Amino acid sequence: MDPKRELTSVDIAAVATELSAYRGAALDKAYLYPDESLLRLKLRHYEHGRIEVLLQVGDPKRVHVTDVDRVPTAPERPPNFAMMMRNRMTGAELADVSQFAFDRVLTMRFERDDGSTTVVAELFGDGNIAVLDESDTVVDCLDTVRLKSRTVAPGSKYEFPSARFNPLTAERDRLAERIRQSDADVVRTLATQCNFGGLYGEELCTRADVPYNIAVEELSEEQLTDLHRVINDLGNRLADGDFDPRIYFEADEEDVDSDDGTRKPVDATPFPLEEYSHLPSDGVETFNEALDDYFNGLEAAERAESETTGSEAPDFQAEIEKFQRIIDQQEGAIEDFEEQAAAEREKAELVYARYDLVDDVLSTIQGARADSIPWDDIAERFEDGADQGIEAAEAVDSVDGSKGTVTLDLDGTRVTLEATTGVEKNADRLYQEAKRIEEKQAGAREAIAETREQLAAAKQRREDWDAGENGESATDGPTDEEEPADVDWLSRASIPIRQTEEWYERFRWFHTSDDFLVIGGRNAEDNEALVEKYLEPGDRFLHAQAHGGPVTVLKATGPSEAGHDVDIPERSVEEAARFAISYSSVWKNGVFAGDVYAADPDQVSKTPESGEYLEKGGFAIRGDRDYYRDVPVGVAVGITCEDQTQVIGGPPAPITEQAATTIHLEPGQYAQNDTAKRCYREFKARFADDSFVRKIASPDLIQEFLPPGGSRIIEE
């Protein structure tokens, strides 16, 4: 199939929603590239940092945020159009992003003390970009347009294309009227009269279970209602930013288009599509990221197609790429199954947690149906009850008589229940659905194990072939006298995963610059375990001089070795002190330094002084302590690529030394989970093999190494 080369109206609606999150970003510079079809806006946002927006109105036609490492080199001499934008807009803040009337037109309005400026990107026909002043007069445009229907020219009032029918906001009867005006089949009507285009015309028919080629005059009222329902759902998701973006690739058995194994993408969508269920796909975090990856991947694949290398790669290269792609898809499916199963279980638990409320709603519906009250009347009664403040009625999100279901909002989670059965049966149905999904997950795990074996075999064949080409033994490697060459892990296309589980990973941990292990408690139970089971003679015990800090143990040796005669360097003790202060309440309180004391194991006791009480996780220190004053807080999170591939975290000095790349943190305004997501996105941007980051450095794993409370990334 031909890859997408321009955005659909659905795509632009999704982009507009995501770009709205950058309101307040100030324009730094505007760049127009030599073919005068690509405009780049460089912005800075107080929260998101540097933002690069590409608007291309030639071939392809696109608007999206791009990774800062992908921005094209700026032209040596900015053309007049770019200079005009800089003069008018430098320092102006993004005030609004919107789509015009569900058309392929995106507007970005910027505000500055001396007035407002609007950038209009027309992503249809020949494409155009116009810059408007506060009165919507065209200051300048890439192409002058003079048609009977509209004019776009400097000095004239900007005229949008004739406003099309907006199906996303239309009431059911208005949509039905619009569709019935057509003399084509339903899919062509949705594509043209409703501006969805062919793909989404087919997708909507599939979701509504309406045949593509049925003539509009043959549509039943029920089918029109179903079409309105799926269109309304699509509109709500676009407005709310409820996206699950996907990048789709060609479905050929040998899905490789070049000697280097480049996959050819065919589309990027804000949601998974039924029409593409047969295609391999990658999930990404945002639709802007999906578009950025898609158009860069499309360019790379097309470039690879046009290049001739003069030599042919071995057959197993394509095989390796295929197996790796299958593994990535299987892993993504497993993650999806985990999320789906957890969501179904959560719904079942919510049903039981709100038993009385759910029972009240179901009993009301069942009683009404027994009295032959129509479903629409039942829905109206719930609406009236909600207006009166009745809790059970307020929880009703919608009633679907055609399916005999009611959807409730239970503590912010939408749960659809069968209205004709009771609470227990509905909860059991949800549990059974979770179990069914988990069985699919188990099958996917078995499949991925088999694929990994196939991948390993293919890699071994490649290694044997490479060894034969170079006249070496396949087992040859660096001798004891040879220093292995430094590896640029960030630029490697594929990084092998090597992981073993260690006993100390249940705690917070890091290794000092002198390779001593430091472990710290995450909670009171961990503190108890560290003192009772893992604090041994020769170790050092450290704790912040503040309530709410972890027990920190600097291990002199491994758990089975004697540590009496080990001399721990002062540098390692200082790093352990920084670890203790950084993961204490000092960080959580937004303070940047604090005191830490150190003691020997025989000074630490769980027996309180006479008349005193030790709470769980507490302890008593007897004798003199060694104090470290004004220890600065500071944490780095990094990813190691050898000998283990994993996330590590702790004091910046040792982590920076041990990791392939690190992110430094200080107390700030972003919650733990938000900071973890920011770090994850940053790591993905740094590694060429972003699938490696997804596998070994998920936001959850990163969060395990973050201090309690708020943090912010320190720009390096």
Image: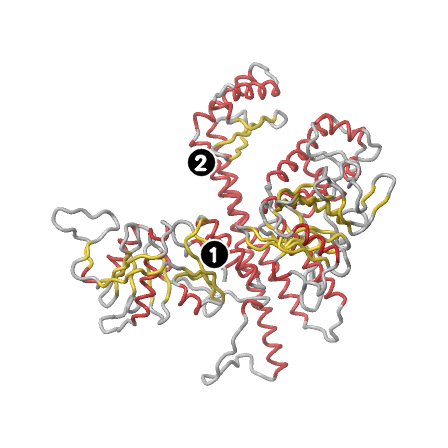
**Amino acid type assigned to the residue bearing label 2 in the image:** Glu
Total count of labels = 2
Distance from Cα at disc 1 to Cα at disc 2: 37 Å
Q: Is residue 82 left or right of residue 125?
A: left
Secondary structure under the numbered disc 1 in the rendered image: strand
Who's the residue at 76% across and 71% down the image? 308
Q: Is residue 154 above or below residue 181?
A: below
Spot occupied by residue 532 in the image (x, y as percentages of width and height) = 24, 57
Picture coordinates of residue 606, whole percent (x, y): 19, 53
Of tags 1 and 2, which is closer to the observer?
1
Among the two numbered marks 1 and 2 on one chain, the one whose residue lies closer to the N terminus: 2
Q: What residue type is labelled 1?
A: Ile
From the viewer's perspective, tell me whether residue 500 is left or right of residue 6. left
Extreme residue in the left direction: 610
Quadrant in which residue 137 is drawn: top right
Residue placed under numbered mark 1 in the picture: 713
> Which of the numbered marks, if any, corresponds to residue 214?
none
Q: Against 458, is 623 above or below?
A: above
Label 2 packing within 10 angstroms: few (<14), some (14-19), many (20+): some
Q: Where is residue 402 in the image (x, y as percent from the top left)?
A: 63, 26
Give the x, y percent position of residue 601.
Answer: 21, 62
